[in-house]
Image (tube, grey):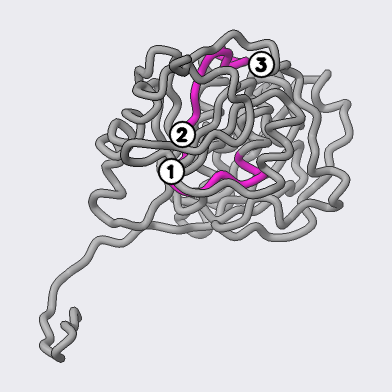
Amino acid sequence: MQVAAGGAVSWRSDDVSAEEPLEIRVGGVSLSVTMRTPGDDFDLVAGFLITEGIVRDAGEIASMRMCPDAAAATGELNIVEVLLTTAAASREVTPRAFFMTSSCGMCGKASIDAVRTASAYDVASDPLRVSPALLLGLPAVQRSAQRQFARTGGLHAAALFDREGLLCCVREDVGRHNAFDKVIGWAATRGMLPLSSHIMLASGRASFELTQKSLMAGIPLLAAVSAPSSLAIELASESGMTLIGFLRGEQMNVYAGHERIIRDE
């Protein structure tokens, strides 16, 4: 039912975004449950394992499969079972302390000390240099590729671009952290890590968790159409990453890594 300001009522159907739980099991042990938009689940899991520091790249994932027992019982494909290689399985894995909602990717950390996961990649020395005009054109490219958002209006997006501003991959999800993991997992399974001289664009704000995920994938520039958080700026500054917020219209704010932006003298 659609209701206008004056009280007029009309009846119409409406498309809404799908949201379902996804449980990630590693070596038979439940690691995390996240609320996500179904689709690209293996990319999501691969990206999650990489950005959490559980594996260094997709080569350390021996196999992934949807849990057949759960699917047979409920008809739903919402559990992914992962087997790691021997080297990766020997590392200590810190399970999420509890359930993650679609709005929070860090709330399940077992301890705050585990949040600042060390990246295997050094983005500070990345030679990427970009013009303001190139960056300001990216949100329009991202929006045009957001097919589900155009239909439902209820999804976040992450878009990966190369140094020339060409779109490499875009993923949508009810959780912004899931969208990032889907993109990073997509790149990892294609042997693209580290994502040197690439740009990641968030459709919303730039939080600490999105900055952390970008750093774990070796991405030197993170841009967002909305505001960054103070901790995101701190992490970007410490790591040598370029962080841009309010990338919209004819201007942007550069909060860290100003040297990568080509400016008029």
Q: Can residue 127 be seen in this view?
A: yes
Q: Residue furthest top?
A: 127
| Depth order, front residue of 93/69 | 93
What SS does tag 1 mark?
Answer: loop
Please provide the residue range marked out in magenta. Answer: 191-210
Foreground mark, 2 or 3, reads 2
What SS does tag 2 mark?
Answer: strand
Separation of disc 2 and disc 3 at Cα?
Answer: 26 Å
Q: Characterize the local packing of mark 2: few (<14), some (14-19) or many (20 or more) Cα atoms within 10 angstroms.
A: many
249 in relation to 2, above or below: above
Residue 196 in magenta stretch: yes
Contact, mark 1 vs mark 3 (Cβ under 8 Å): no
55 in relation to 114, above or below: above
Q: Residue 225 carries which label?
A: 1
Q: Is residue 39 visible?
A: no
Give the mark nearer the N terminus: 2 vs 3: 3
Give the mark nearer the N terminus: 1 vs 3: 3
- Amino acid type of the residue that numbered disc 2 sits on in the rendered structure: Leu
Contact, mark 1 vs mark 2 (Cβ under 8 Å): yes
Percent of width and height locating residue 134:
36, 21
| Depth order, front residue of 80/198 | 198
238 in relation to 31, above or below: above
Percent of width and height locating residue 204:
46, 48
- Amino acid type of the residue that numbered disc 1 sits on in the rendered structure: Val
Q: What residue sits right under mark 2 in the picture?
A: 201
Give the mark nearer the N terminus: 1 vs 2: 2
Q: Residue at position x 45%, y 55% from top?
A: 75
Q: What residue sits right under mark 3 in the picture?
A: 59
